[in-house]
Image (cartoon, rainbow, N blue to C red):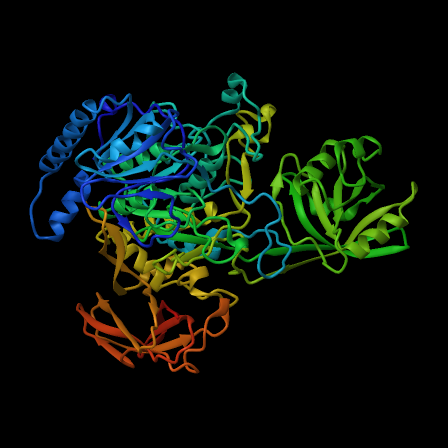
Amino acid sequence: MIIDKKNRKPWNVMVLTALSTSLVFGGIGYSPLSVSAETKTGSLNVSEDIKLDSTEIVSVIVELEEAPEHLAIAEALEKGENLSESQAKAKVETSQDSFEEDLSTTHSSYTITHTYQSVFNGFTIELPANQLETLTEIEGVKTVWENEEVQLIDPVLEESVLEEAIEPYMADSVPYLGVDRLHIDGITGDGVKVGVLDTGIDYTHPDLAAAYKGGYDFVDGDDDAQETTYDDWLASGEPEFNVNGNSYYTSHGTHVAGTIAGQGDNESDFATTGIAPDADLYSYRVLGPYGSGSTANVIGGIELSVEDGMDIINLSLGSANNDALSATSVAVNNAVLAGVTAVVSAGNNGRDGMYTLGSPGASPLAITVGANDVPLVFTDFTGYLDESFSAGLVNISSGFDTDFDELEAGEYGIVYAGLGSVSEFDQVDAEGKVALVARGELAFVDKIANAKAAGAEAIIIYNNIAGAGHIPNYFGEGVNFVAGFSLTFEDGTALRDAINEDSTFSFGDRSESQTPGGVLADFSSRGPVNESFAIKPEVSAPGVNTLSPVPSYMNGPEYIGDFEYAYGRKSGTSMSAPHVAGTAALLLEVKPELAPADVKTTLMNTANPMTLDYSVFEIGAGQIDPVAAIETDVLVQVKGESLTLDPLNRVTAIKDLTGALNYGTFAKNGKNVRDFQSVTFKNVSAESKTFTIEFDHHVGIQGSKDAVLNGVAFQAPQTVVVPAGETITQNIFFISPKTAEAGTYEGYINITNQADSNEQYRVPFAAGLTN
């Protein structure tokens, strides 16, 4: 439903990045200070940094017991009851009026800054910290949440190393995923509405202008959901970069939007066609300067996206808390229950190991996405110094105007510029020459940009770690870049020592090679979800060195309005999520009847194995396969449950239809364990199908235990017959003897059509045993 923007309530609080709240939770996990009463007092969920005896003004989000409008309607439908929008709205308004009346009698000093009704019933309120406990005692209050600051899931700017060391030139993810074939067939996401909750969108970019249909700015409280611009920074008087290195002006949302719905209309060799170029693109600017915002704005963005009738929302944002009961996780759940497919980045903390999901990535009903690479093309040369030295070079960067043919044909002077700082380049004459620098201290991109500023034709960066080989990174193209290459430590120091003022350097023996792709990025956050032990992320998608549009000012103020090179490569699960959001748009164009749970399950069923072996808690079902998802006529869906809170704040179960068997964890207590989950096999084709079911048990992957050795069994029929146009249900059992070793038992169920071995589906499964 499109709401009247003139009648919107003001969104005047800016504190954000991503949290939501409301109904469904898939695990408990991170636990802030929680004060809860037995029945009538709402729970208080704030960090220990907030002192409950302080008069300091704090911002909190109050959730009321009465279900929000869209959730109440969904619950009524589930029970076979009728509840109109006006009836649901009236109940919410009555509960809010009652709360405000009771609040006014508490003699508290407070300011209500936000009001929510659609996917969250409650308010954002500013008041002294010593009045928070009084707030929980008001009748009808369910939970009081801290209005946390949240951040976009920052692109990985430092060294992002894939789990298999490679030195890539990034290939295009659209043809890699087979999406270009779908475009040729006319499947482009036409008419599907996709909302991007992010830093805004530069809707003046030629690749996005026609796709952009509108939105709302929760940071400034108006209808102009543009990014924070360079001019905004100039007018602000604030530092250009914050302590985290993020610029005041932003580009993240534009990059995400380009992956989803870029139309390739720009007059540029780098024009980008997204996954769903004919989707209707909406921007909900919930993150402001430096890519920061508040829980309140994120909830507002989720709520308005539902009211505006979005089919899909993309949230490449979050906090580092692996918490399925966080405010953001709950709000996302309620949006899904209202019929919106929510795609969320897993997070970029994978280097810290397992259990590194963020929120709302921990939301059980969201599609949570990890990041992998695509096939990578190596551009290799042999570098020659006079006749005294030669060594292999691997490309790590290029300018938008780099011509490797010209580079190979030339001969160049060469200078050594230390670590590549500005001051070191000032001490040498690099104009028209090759600059050799050592790895260390400065970011690679700064070394490359400094070489460009010094007039160098190319830069060679040698590793500073003996025996470590080449630098395993590709930093992309840029207007401030030159052709860049890596050398090993051994070759780099030898070249450094051989250089003199008369040396001549040349590039020869050019060659190219390609890696297979499908390798998980080391930064991609892993599951499982805290407490519930649920399998997340559900899928993985390309998110390494993704090329997509950015605002023109990101190339510098002299490029404002010049979009020829307004593109950038970024890495992170922020980049992989929009690949999935775009794929969901293609799927909904062809199969508009699919519910959000069906979209998730379809993408999981048809996902492909990765190049290397991973835990199900690292990649879920595997890498998405858009073509297979569009073409499938079978749905294998687990009738699972996730956790939520009832109006009295008691943990309770809620239906969670998905593509994974999440058995959870079991305490052995010296007894055998037996549990089952029901799985439906839906065949919408015109012919009966017989499937073979096989279990692929993991052993040793992220510490997984040997099921066969321990007598642990996952049991299902060896074959399942599904008549044409019908749905059948089978129970799949988890059985463990009391002697089984404690730990994780996981793997994949491989489901193969006996009549066509090319028709295969896979379902990840996992169960945990504790002593």
Q: Position of residue 514 (x, y in %)?
A: 60, 60
Q: x, y percentage for residue 195?
A: 34, 39
Residue 587 or residue 49, whichever sits in front? 49
Can the viewer see residue 263 in this picture? no
> Residue at (15%, 33%) from the top-left corner?
95
Q: Is residue 470 above or below residue 149?
A: below
Front-most of residues 151 and 301: 151
Residue 43 lies in quadrant: top left
Residue nearest the viewer, comparing 574 with 432: 574
Residue that lies at the very extreme toward the front in this rendered image: 53
Residue 205 appears in view: yes
In-image side of 505 versus 313 (left or right): right
On screen, residue 561 versus residue 724, left or right, reads right
Q: Position of residue 480 (x, y in %)?
A: 65, 34
Query: Residue 541, how many percent across, how many down?
Result: 45, 54
Q: Quadrant of residue 677?
A: bottom left
Q: Residue at x 55, y 45 (%)?
A: 156
Vertical side of 227 occupied by 342: above or below: below
Quarter of the image where the N terminus is located:
top left
Q: Quadrant of the C terminus?
A: bottom left
